[in-house]
Image: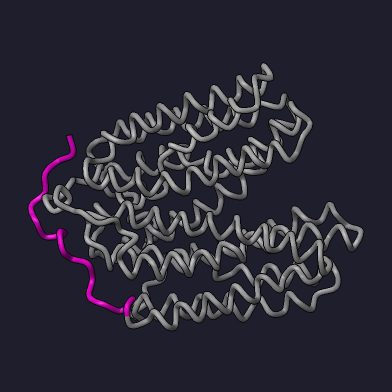
Amino acid sequence: MSNPYGAIFRAPGAKGFAAAGFFARMPMAMAPIGIVAMLSQTHGEYWLAGAVSAAYALGNALLSPQISRLVDRLGQSRILVPTTIVSVLAFGALILAANQHWPVWTLFAAALLAAFMPSYPAMLRARWSELFRDRPELHTAFAFESAADELVYVAGASLSVGLSVALFPEAGMAVSTALLALGSIAFIAQRATEPRVSLETAVAQHSAIWQRPVQIVTLILIFIGSMFATTAVTAVAMTEALGQPEAASLVIGVYAIGSFVVGLIFGAVKLKLPLQQQLAIAVAIIAVTAVPLLFVSTVPLLTIAVFASGIAISTTFITAFGLIERRLPASMLTEGITWVMTGIGIGMALGSFAAGWVVDTYGASNGFTVSVVAGALALLTVLVGQKTLAGKPGVAGRHLKHQPAE
């Protein structure tokens, strides 16, 4: 049996843009926690560190879909160059402001400008779509990207904190900024694999968020993202309550590892079941496996339950992005993917807040109640949206003549 992952990387330019994009997207995991690690040490105030990090995260959630919409209209290189330059310079200013103890308002100003960082995961998926549109290899490519995203989230956050603690407060952010600069230069330079701008794009008037499939999938991933964050927050609280706080990293690690492995396996399998039904099954698994988390009382049981609850996360992401690719015209694809990515981030923010409040109010063991509720809502949403998600593929604009991005 041939290796499906080897097949996708035999496409001209695939190895190059995939490698460059992997490093360019590292800041999506390193920057938020890196800001907290840096400012908590330089200023000694966690509220300030959290507030500046939240300003960056919220700003990026609002700006990145608009940046991706411009990418769909004008091409990747024309938009990625200026927005990445602004982001890199702003991150540099933030590092300098922290080191030199500039006024607090400069921290927030720099963080908001840094939020112009483009969504490189969306840019990568757009390039894979250009290579393999309407071909089975696209499923494998999206599986690879989902696994890579998870690896970035797990390794990036740990690397950012580790560097800041082991070297100097700004180390994590400095490395994150360097990876963004070097990765983006290498990515943008590869013009041969850049998606072409279709003629339809020039007259597109409405944002992708007004497309019903995008709304449904984004809402589903808001709930899934909240479950992801709830697991991290509650695992930390529970291991501390059980007297084994050092076990938190292991518990959170197996959550991501299970999803990573299953995602790679799923990407190598070609299922004939419609994508919307695959998504419903994956979300159902997530919802059902969240329930046992309410009844764990030891660290070993918590580890096993968390591992089981994470096995379908990557599968959900893979089918969700696959649906967006199928249901949107090419002229809206990058923006549509970015809205879905934004949904994950919004969900993580909401989940962290909700789980923290439940843990503080009702105790650590009740934090997973948020996961159970979010899982039920995600399942309800995907079931109600089956008819819409099963609609005709968004082929408008895919078969028109194309013009290269200048």
Q: Magenta segment, which residues? A: 388-406
Residue drawn at x 81%, y 59% as measured from the top left: 237
Residue 17 image position (x, y, % from top left) = 35, 41
Q: Quadrant of residue 67?
A: top left
Q: Residue at x 54, y 23 (%)?
A: 92
Figure quadrant of the C terminus: top left
Figure quadrant of the N terminus = bottom left
Query: What's the colour scheme?
Result: one colour
Q: Is residue 220 above or below residue 37?
A: below
Q: Is residue 378 left or right of residue 373?
A: left
Q: How many marks?
A: 0
Residue sticking out furthest to the left = 401
**Of 277 and 17, which appears nearest the observer?**
277
Q: Position of residue 100 (x, y in %)?
A: 67, 16
> Is residue 188 among what the camera can see?
yes
Question: Residue 144 or 29: which is nearer the viewer?
Answer: 29
**Magenta segment includes 391:** yes
Residue at image position (18%, 53%) is: 204
Location of residue 374 by image quarter: bottom right
Residue 43 within the segment the image draws in magenta: no
Work out which residue is located at the far top of the displayed protein and give it.
Answer: 100
Residue 46 lies, in percent from the top left, at: 75, 39
Name the main secondary structure of what is drawn in magenta. Answer: loop
Question: In this view of the protein, can residue 254 be seen by the observer?
Answer: no
Say above or below: 58 vs 4.
Answer: above
Q: Residue 348 or 353: which is nearer the viewer?
A: 353
Image position of 297 (left or right of 358): right
User: Could you tell me residue 297's position as x and y percent?
Assistant: 85, 73
